[in-house]
Amino acid sequence: MGGGNWSSSAYSAARKARQAKGVPDFKRSAEVRQGKVSTVHPSLDASKLAGPTSPVAGRPIRESRDSEEHPNSLPIAVIFDVTGSMGQIPRTLQKKLPKLMDVILDKSSVADPQVLVGAVGDSHSDKFPFQVGQFESDNRFDEQLRNIIIEGGGGGQVMESYALAYRFAADHTAIDSFEKRGKKGYFFTMGDEAPWPTVTKAEVKRIFGLTVEADESVASLIKRAEEKWEIFHLCAMDGSYPNNQKIHSQWEKLLGERYVKVADSSMICEIIAGIVHMLESAYDARRVVQDIGLTGKAAATVANALAPLAEVAAGTLPAGHAS
């Protein structure tokens, strides 16, 4: 958990080795389709308990911890909708991981990022509605990303179980950046639909293996998660519902400017890296895009996504505030 360092060269070497052997990047998904496996990969099981040496031993919690190697850990969690048309997003992220990590490490002056990846679906209809890895400083989070099952489901109600991600952020993470230094981590969700309004007791039992006393609203979960996380939801405007104002209104009410519209979801890595860079540096969108090294249409896409966050980056808007 959290040891080692990211290496773009190791990423490239591993990718070439898989290609040479004919191993798909998302092998677990392929095995599910082939009927070889039928469960979430053990590394992505949200009910997995912290080990006996952990301060939160025996609890279903993912930890981002400081160490001698990484004394200033900063957690970055990225949770993708893998239903329907959104199934391409993890593949896009996986192909562009060097861009994401190189910007965060080289441009944002984040010395010790620890990245966690996960996936969300529809708990009302999907077999694998929530999958989540560990916080990692090295290339192991790439391995966990490739273990995600891209179910491609969804129940057709124009709502997905994003609230499970916020339950996870609020109650199933322990992060030294906040506990020791009061520094919030970064928590991103991405999709093209609205959130189911509640996480039910039954869902908590099924996903996290815990018994709780009551259902909880998505608004309440976001509010609690915001105590230790900078929360952003990225809306794929090239998804299925770009003109559905009901979806946009719901998210804007929940997150204000932190509801980020993404015109081209193939630029997701650049936008995530840009948001982290923007908030860490307080630079404007133009400078951030320049630092990332983008030009033309790509630069315009990222700049347009980042521009509404200028006040957030400047620290003049609180979490979830809509101007």
Image (cartoon, rainbow, N blue to C red):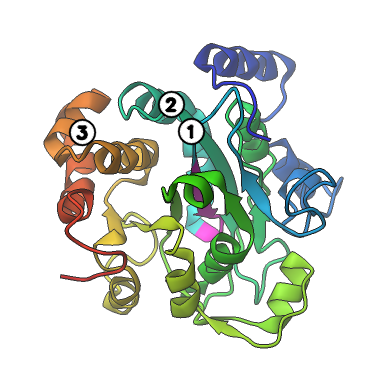
Residue 38 in the image: above or below residue 74: below
From the image, state whether disc 2 or disc 3 is nearer to you: 2
Q: Residues in magenta?
A: 75-84
From the image, state whether disc 2 or disc 1 is nearer to you: 1
Residue type at numbered disc 2: Ala
Q: Earlier in the sequence, mark 2 or mark 3?
A: 2
> Do the residues bearing badges 3 and 1 touch, measured as CB atoms within 8 Å?
no
Q: Main structural element of the magenta stretch: helix, strand or loop?
A: strand
Residue plotted at (73% across, 81% down): 202
Residue plotted at (53% across, 11% down): 9
Q: Mark on residue 288?
A: 3
Element class at badge 1: loop
In the image, 253 versus 41, the foreground residue is 253
Q: CA distance from mark 3 to mark 1?
A: 23 Å
From the image, state whether disc 3 or disc 1 is nearer to you: 1
Q: Mark on residue 198?
A: none
Q: CA distance from mark 2 to mark 1?
A: 7 Å
Q: Earlier in the sequence, mark 2 or mark 1?
A: 1
Q: Residues within 10 Å of mark 2 (few under 14, many from 20)?
A: some
